[in-house]
Amino acid sequence: MLIILTIPFGHFRFLRCQWYLFEWKQRGFIMEEDQGLDPYKHLKIAPNHDGTITRLRVDPPTSPASDPNLPISVLTKDIIIIPEFNVSARIFVPRKALDNSSPKLPLILYFHGGGFILFSAASSMFHDFCINMANDVQAIVLSLDYRLAPDHRLPAAYDDAMQALHWIQTNHDDWLGKYADLSSSYLMGSSSGANIAYHAGLRVVAESEGYDEPLKIRGLILVQPFVGGMERRGSELRLVNDPVLPLCVTDLMWELSLPVGSNRDHEYCNPMAGRDDEEKKKKMQKMRVLGWRVMVIGCEGDPLVDRQKEMVTWMEENGVKVEVSFEDGYNHGAELRNALKQKELFSKTKTFVGS
C-alpha cells in the first residue's frame, strides 16, 4: 500500500525550523525552553498557496508633507520612478535647504530593510528614520519603495535601484535640481537595504561610464548588511535564537527572496561566492580606481556580524577603502529602535559624506 503524506508549505517550514532547533540544542547552542519558534509568526506573515505571502503587520503608511508652511523641519514628497511597476520614492529635504544662500546638500539614495519582503518607504519606522537622517546629516534623502519578494524575487530590487539612479540622472525633479548636489551622491541601506546598496554599487562600477554626469556616486554606506551562506558562522550559531533575527527567520527570508531553486550560496546572499572570480575582483578594483569609499556599520549582537566582517576583509583585500565600526552588544536593526544608536549613526554618516 502506498501512503502519501502531504504537509502544507507553512507546516513544512515550521518542522524544518524545529529540526534546526533540535540539532543546535544537541550541540549545546540553545536551551530547552528556546525551542518552538515559528518564523512566519515571528515575521507576522502567512504563506499563500500561490507562493506569495500575506503581511499581517499593522503599520499604517505615513503620508508625505510638502507644504513649507507646515511647522516641520523636513519636507517630504512622493514621486513615481517606474510607472509600469508602480515603484516610487519618497524625497526628504531639510527645511534649511530652502534658504537660497545655502549650498546644495549631498544626496543619499536610501534602501529600507525588511528582509526584502517587508515594509516600504512610507512605513513609519523608515519614514521617521529618513526624516531624522535628513535633519541630522543635512542631506537630501531619496528613499526607494522597491518591489518586494516573493512576488518580485531578486534581482527585482536591484533592478529598481538601477532604475532609480537612471531616473535621478535623467529627470529634472525641482527639489533635486534646487537642493541636491548630485556630484556628491551615496548609496545607503539598512540590513537588506544595505545588501541592495552593495549590489547596486557593483552594477554601477560595471557601468560607470554611464553614471558620471550629473550623477556621481562617491561611496556606499552599509548598515548591518543582510548577508549569509550555507555554512554557518560562529555568530550565527552563537545567536541562533536571537530575539530580533533568529537563524530560521533569516533562512525563511532568503527562501522567499532568492531566485527559485537557489540556495544561500547564491551571490545575492553570499558576497564570498565566487570570490576568486576575476570579474568580481575587477569590480572591486574599479571601485578603488573611482575613489569610492565604503562605510560598514555593525555590532557584535547581530547574528550576521561574522559574515559582515568577511565581506569587509574581502573588499579591503581588493583595494577598496573601508571605514568599519563593529561595536559590542546591541541587536540587528538597533539604529531603528534606539535613539542613541541612531544619533551615533547619523554623526558617522555626516562625517563620512562631508569628508
Image (spheres, rainbow, N blue to C red):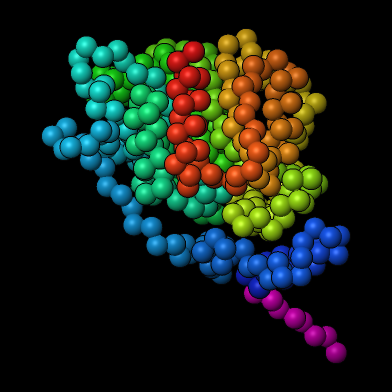
Residue 129: x and y in percent read 40, 40
Residue occupying the far bottom of the picture = 1
Query: Magenta part of the protein: which range?
Result: 1-8
Please report the residue visible at 29 percent of the width from the left and 39 percent of the height from the top.
78
Please report the residue visible at 62 percent of the width from the left and 10 percent of the height from the top.
289
Please report the residue visible at 64 percent of the width from the left and 16 percent of the height from the top.
321
Relative side of 321 to 223, left or right:
right
Relative side of 159 to 39, left or right:
left
Q: Quadrant of the N terminus?
A: bottom right
Residue 242: x and y in percent read 66, 55
Overall secondary structure of the magenta section: loop
Q: Is residue 50 above or below residue 206?
A: below
Is residue 212 something that shows in the picture? yes
Residue 202 falls in image quadrant? top right
Residue 205: x and y in percent read 58, 19
Q: Nearer the viewer, residue 354 or 300?
A: 300
Q: Is residue 323 above or below residue 117?
A: above
Residue 90: x and y in percent read 34, 38
Please report the residue visible at 30 percent of the width from the left and 23 percent of the height from the top.
176
Query: Does the magenta portion include 267?
Result: no
Q: Nearer the viewer, residue 291 or 29?
A: 29
Is residue 116 something that shows in the picture? no
Query: Does the magenta portion include 6?
Result: yes
